[in-house]
Amino acid sequence: MRIDVLTVLPKLFEGPFSDSILKRAQDKGLVEIHLHNLRDFSTDKHKNVDDYQYGGGAGMVMRIEPIAACIEHLKKQRDYDEIIYMTPDGSLLEQGVSNFLSTQQNLMILCGHYKGVDERVRQLFITREISIGSYVLSGGELAAAVLVDSVIRLIPGVLSDETSALTDSFQDRLLAPPVYTRPPDFMGHKVPEVLIRGNFNEIEAWREDQAIKRTQERRPDLLD
Ligand code: ADE
């Protein structure tokens, strides 16, 4: 998979993309992440990418020209399955969307800033708008990092135990059951007997039961 990220703050991605699972996925050649600084596509002498909004009001708006130039430049080189815009008024990111995106070849992700992008960018280029939650971040970069992480970990070969992504919370619309490791007894707080006995069927039944209980208690909306 190839992911192109369009941003005015490429440095924000250095941390999340250069460590742990995302780094390993790139080192193994399973994913290529390319960062593009939108300022490089500004023809303005100060490399400006934003301007005042028509009609007045506080907050700057990202101009269409640098974004269009960057998108057209990339589209000339390959076809994109999705051109995604990170925005608080997009549709809420859910596991099913990450599952779908993890099966695609080429993704482009546009990070908004200030008041957002000129509406014509959305009309002309964007195929999907995603929000990571009902709150406003200072820009789309952290949201894009969240999206990229949730997608890349699903690509076969990225996680060392390939089944582990399938047993995540949300994969079957249930939260994951509790997990334990050693010691079996921490100051009187014991690991459930069933896990220690080691009967596979019993353990599976217990996990299913716990997952349903936890979902009923914490996220009953998932069971609707
Ligand atoms: N940009 C700003 N806030 C955001 C959010 N909640 N989700 C996606 N992109 C955003």
Image (spheres, helix red, strand yellow):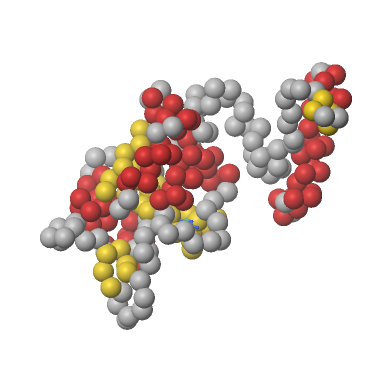
Residue at image point 79% right, 50% down: 217
Q: Nearer the viewer, residue 125 or 201?
A: 201
Q: Residue furthest front?
A: 187
Residue furthest out toward the left: 45
- Against 28, residue 84 (above or below) is below
The residue at 48%/39% (across/down) is 149
State the residue at coordinates (47%, 35%).
152
Residue at the outermost top position: 198
Q: Position of residue 68 (x, y in %)?
A: 25, 56
Dividing the image into 4 quarters, which one contains the C terminus?
A: bottom right
Q: Toward the viewer: 18 or 35?
A: 18
Q: Quadrant of the N terminus?
A: top left
Q: Measured along the vertical axis of the image, is residue 119 above or below residue 75?
A: below
Q: Nearer the viewer, residue 121 or 40?
A: 40
Q: Residue 11, relative to residue 45: is it above or below? A: above
In the shown orientation, is residue 169 left or right of residue 76? right
- Residue 125 at what x, y percent from top left? 33, 56
Residue 146 image offset from top left, x and y in percent: 49, 45
**Residue 166 visible:** yes
Rendering quarter of residue 29: top left
Residue in the picture at 37% in, 46% down: 12
Q: Quadrant of residue 176?
A: top right
Residue 42 or residue 47, whichever sits in front: 47
User: x, y percentage for residue 120?
Assistant: 32, 65
